[in-house]
Image: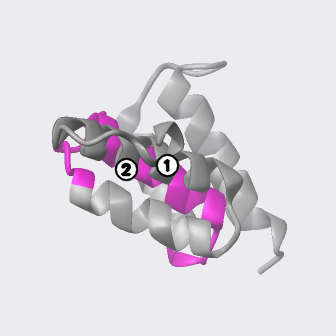
Amino acid sequence: MKADVPAAMNNLGLLYMNGRCVARDYAEAKRLFDQGTALGNDASMNSLGVLYDQGNGVPRNRTRAMQLFEKAAALGNHEAIQNLRERRRQINLGKGQPARCCR
């Protein structure tokens, strides 16, 4: 398999997730992100995490989203790193603690 195939799966999934050039279809986006994730594509892991984080086309599962963001971040995905920071900030705010960036 060519190395660019998992990236193409993620890119196509993003089109379906955002309804760009195709009808919005979260189920198809998830299917493509699942395939890319299974092939180790960090962008697909992050995109799948976004679906779970927002509950688009899947039951909202922030624990699963965090797992996917962490896995993608460990592979160097900058969007996943940002998603982790934002999610952790929201968790800290929910506990009545200032976010790290504000200390």
Q: Main secondary structure of the magenta part?
A: helix
* Lateral position of residue 39 relative to residue 100, left or right: right
| Other residues around mark 1 within 10 Å, as few (<14) / some (14–19) / many (≥20) | some
Q: Percent x, y for residue 94?
A: 19, 37
**Camera sees residue 103:** yes
The amino acid at mark 2 is Arg
Distance from the alpha carbon under mark 1 to that under mark 2: 5 Å
* Lateral position of residue 4 relative to residue 103, left or right: right
Q: Percent x, y for residue 84?
A: 47, 53
Residue drawn where x is 52% and y is 61% of the image: 45
Give the residues in magenta.
38-62
| Residue under label 2 | 88
Which element type, helix, strand or loop, lies under badge 1?
Answer: helix
The quadrant in which residue 13 appears is top right
Residue drawn where x is 20% and y is 51% of the image: 61
Residue drawn where x is 45% and y is 48% of the image: 100
Looking at this view, is 57 or 71 the one in front? 71
| Residue under label 1 | 85
Residue 17 counted in the magenta span:
no
